[in-house]
Amino acid sequence: MFGSKPTFSDREDAGRQLAEAMLAHPMHDPVVMALPRGGVPVAFEVAQRLGIPLDLLIVRKIGAPGHPEYGIGAVVDGKEPHVVISEEAARHFHIPPGYIATERDHQVAEIERRHRMYFGEDEPEQHDHSGRDIILVDDGIANGGSIRAGIHALKEMGVGTIRIAVPVAPRDLLETLKEEVDEIVCLSAPERLEAVSRHYGDFSETTDQDVVRLLKEARRVNRMIH
């Protein structure tokens, strides 16, 4: 569903608008999974409006040798961390022996640190969503590296269906992503996306403290509902 071009006052506003759009797409036993950190305030609003659980999918980029800003792959949180390497991106760079394994270990350690910070000493089973319908949420898609890694990992985890829900993403990227998921809900799909931040009035950084607070609130509300 590709719509017109709204402006979002902030991530919460974007999440409320996404939730309204999602009401027309009923799902069986769904879970909202946010890409932290910026996707969490958006996903929180979706989860609250739809009355469903909120979880995180922590994705860490693997940068190219000497060009850390250029992603050649990613590591995704899970019972077993999932490593996704873009062969096309990797071909553009000379990858030294052992480089990807070293980067993987580095990013797995960072994922474990963030997981403990966000969830405390929880059990991996609490994040096992095999067979369930997933709504994968971010605050916008620029180049698609993180969301593609997330989709790949969710499929390996054996989830039921995957729906992407984002406020804004470039139209051509959405066309390619359509082949990889069951459905896409996107509120604004410009031909050219210069920056996700330009579609928000307030795009101030989401902090780790914000993530922890929203997760606690989501769990509290979910317990009340169920």
Image (spheres, grey):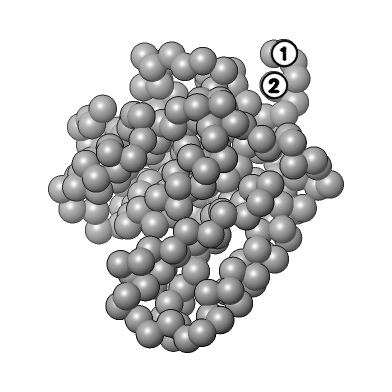
**Above-or-below relation of 197 to 4:** below
Do the CB atoms of the residues marked 1 and 2 lie less than 8 Å apart? yes
For the question of whether residue 106 can be seen, the reply is yes
Viewer-proximal residue among 95 and 215? 95
Give the labeled residue for mark 2: 222
Give the total of numbered labels: 2
For the question of whether residue 202 can be seen, the reply is no
Q: CA distance from mark 1 to mark 2?
A: 6 Å
* Kind of element beneath mark 2: helix
Viewer-proximal residue among 219 and 15? 219
User: Which quarter of the image is occupied by the N terminus?
Assistant: top left
Q: Residue furthest right?
A: 121
The amino acid at mark 1 is His
Q: Quadrant of residue 25?
A: top left
Residue 114 percent location from the top left of the image? 69, 56
The amino acid at mark 2 is Asn
Q: Is residue 16 left or right of residue 105?
A: left
Residue 163 percent location from the top left of the image? 41, 31
Q: Is residue 19 left or right of residue 89?
A: right
Q: Mark 1 packing: few (<14 Cα in 10 Å), some, or many (20+)?
A: few
Specify the label residue 17 is tagged with.
none
Q: Quadrant of residue 108?
A: bottom right
Residue visible at 36% across and 14% down in the picture: 24
Give the labeled residue for mark 1: 226
Q: Residue furthest left?
A: 191
Q: Is residue 194 left or right of residue 10?
A: left
User: Which quarter of the image is occupied by the C terminus?
Assistant: top right
Residue visible at 50% across and 27% down in the picture: 160
Residue 3 percent location from the top left of the image? 22, 30
Viewer-proximal residue among 140 and 156? 156
Residue 56 percent location from the top left of the image? 60, 42
